[in-house]
Image (cartoon, grey):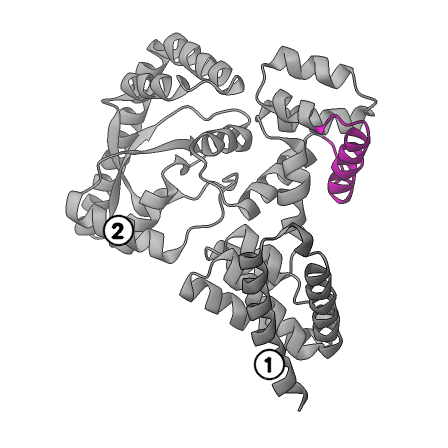
């Protein structure tokens, strides 16, 4: 080995040793504050469980405890958290953050923990991605002890910030439910069956109230149901996150079975209401092959995203597409519209109108009859 390479190697060892000493020092400081950190963490969790707004103030208090422990870590040594519930990071969002960081620098440190020789992100993946886009070599970081039940804790933090889209939420909830020992294929069915029984018992409004209640009230509610062990386990988990199981059943878990192209569009920013409408464009409804139906869905998804179409405009676009490829549906819609128009005319209570009102109705109907005659000739 040349003297230059030897010196370089020694330098790397010294730098690594200094870095490790810094980390050990940080852990020593964290140990000194361990009781305070633990107390704050538990209090934050209790406040979250009760849906209490003061949890944000406690979070700031916890951040204050962790201040002053920032170090610069090479970006190449920071790895994505495999337990990260959030999978969607739109390019536009990362580019916008990168522009801000390029101008203002990094204002908030990312939180990482050591796992073997790697630093794993606990909080700050968007900042990490933006820094990579800017070709930064290091990132201001705080090393924290490796948390237990990591996926659930990150999920809770993101629910607190409403930082997950519906697809990411569905996947994260499914992962946690599987960790409880429930079979993946049975989870949506379990939830749906239990919700149907509550619906028949007229207890859904009670469930809505309980979702935001304290743990004791949730346990009392569960004890009053006829749930089996798996159903109770699933409801207990969802309620612990202050999620309404009925909403998860109706709007969250169904997204997992959407067409792959629709799920991809959701990750690109497609709203769940529009996604639900576009999901109707199946090969069966369009009378087309899967390939052709997929191409139609992709084109419409791109248009909805590009033009930022509202739910109403998306619905009209979907109905127009279905009618174009399925004339029978168009005939059914026209028949329903005709029956509705006739019924509306027949229901006019002319005997309750004065002469002025009757004259206005007569003029409107004569104008409409003239249009009808023109179409018939």
In contact (CB < 8 Å): disc 1 and disc 2: no
In the shown orientation, is residue 38 left or right of residue 265?
A: left
Q: Residue at x 46, y 61 (%)?
A: 309
Which residue is at the far front? 355
Task: Reply yes or no: does residue 185 show up in magenta.
Answer: yes
* Mark 1 burial class by Cα count in 10 Å: few <14, some 14-19, many 20+: few
322 in relation to 164, above or below: below
Residue 170 seen in the figure: yes
179 in relation to 285, above or below: above
Q: Residue 210, image x and y in percent?
A: 63, 20
Q: Residue 24, image x and y in percent?
A: 32, 22
Across the whole image, how many numbered discs are drawn on residues? 2
Q: Quadrant of the C terminus?
A: bottom right
Secondary element at tag 2: helix
Determine which quarter of the picture holds residue 222. Answer: top right
Secondary element at tag 1: helix
Bounds of the magenta span?
181-204
Q: Residue at x 57, y 26 (%)?
A: 241
Question: Marks 1 and 2, Cα distance to the nearest angstrom?
Answer: 63 Å
Q: Residue 234, image x and y in percent?
A: 71, 29
Q: Residue at x 25, y 43 (%)?
A: 138
Tag of residue 370 = 1
Classified by dominant secondary structure, the portion drawn in magenta counts as helix
Q: Residue tagged by mark 2? A: 98
């Amino acid at each position: 080995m040349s003297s230059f390479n030897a010196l370089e190697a020694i330098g790397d060892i010294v730098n690594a040793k200094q870095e490790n000493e810094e980390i050990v020092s940080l852990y020593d400081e964290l140990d000194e504050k361990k009781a305070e950190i633990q107390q704050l963490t538990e209090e934050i969790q209790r406040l979250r469980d009760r849906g209490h707004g003061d949890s944000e103030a406690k979070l700031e208090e916890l951040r204050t405890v962790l201040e002053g422990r920032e170090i610069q870590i090479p970006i190449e040594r920071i790895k994505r958290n495999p337990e990260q519930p959030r999978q969607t990071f739109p390019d536009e969002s990362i580019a916008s953050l990168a522009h801000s960081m390029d101008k203002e620098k990094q204002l908030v440190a990312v939180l990482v923990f050591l796992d073997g020789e790697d630093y794993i992100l606990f909080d700050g993946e968007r900042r990490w991605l933006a820094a990579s886009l800017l070709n930064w070599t290091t990132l201001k970081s705080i090393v924290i002890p490796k948390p237990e039940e990591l996926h659930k804790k990150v999920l809770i933090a993101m629910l607190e910030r409403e930082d997950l889209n519906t697809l990411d939420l569905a996947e994260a909830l499914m992962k946690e439910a599987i960790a409880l020992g429930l079979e993946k294929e049975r989870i949506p069915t379990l939830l749906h069956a239990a919700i149907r029984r509550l619906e028949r018992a007229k207890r859904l409004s009670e469930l809505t109230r309980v979702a935001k209640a304290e743990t004791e009230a949730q346990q009392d509610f569960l004890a009053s149901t006829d749930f089996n062990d798996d159903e109770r386990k699933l409801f207990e988990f969802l309620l612990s996150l202050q999620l309404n199981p009925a909403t998860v059943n109706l709007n969250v878990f169904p997204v997992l079975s959407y067409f792959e192209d629709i799920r991809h569009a959701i990750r690109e920013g497609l709203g769940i209401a529009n996604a639900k409408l576009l999901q109707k464009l199946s090969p069966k409804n369009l009378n087309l092959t899967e390939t052709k139906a997929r191409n139609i869905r992709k084109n419409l998804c791109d248009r909805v995203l590009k033009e930022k179409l509202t739910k109403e405009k998306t619905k009209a676009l979907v109905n127009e597409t279905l009618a174009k490829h399925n004339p029978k549906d168009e005939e059914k819609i026209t028949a329903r519209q005709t029956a509705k128009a006739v019924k509306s005319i027949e229901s006019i209570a002319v005997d309750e109108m004065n002469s002025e009102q009757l004259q206005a109705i007569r003029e409107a109907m004569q104008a409409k009859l003239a249009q009808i005659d023109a179409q018939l000739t």
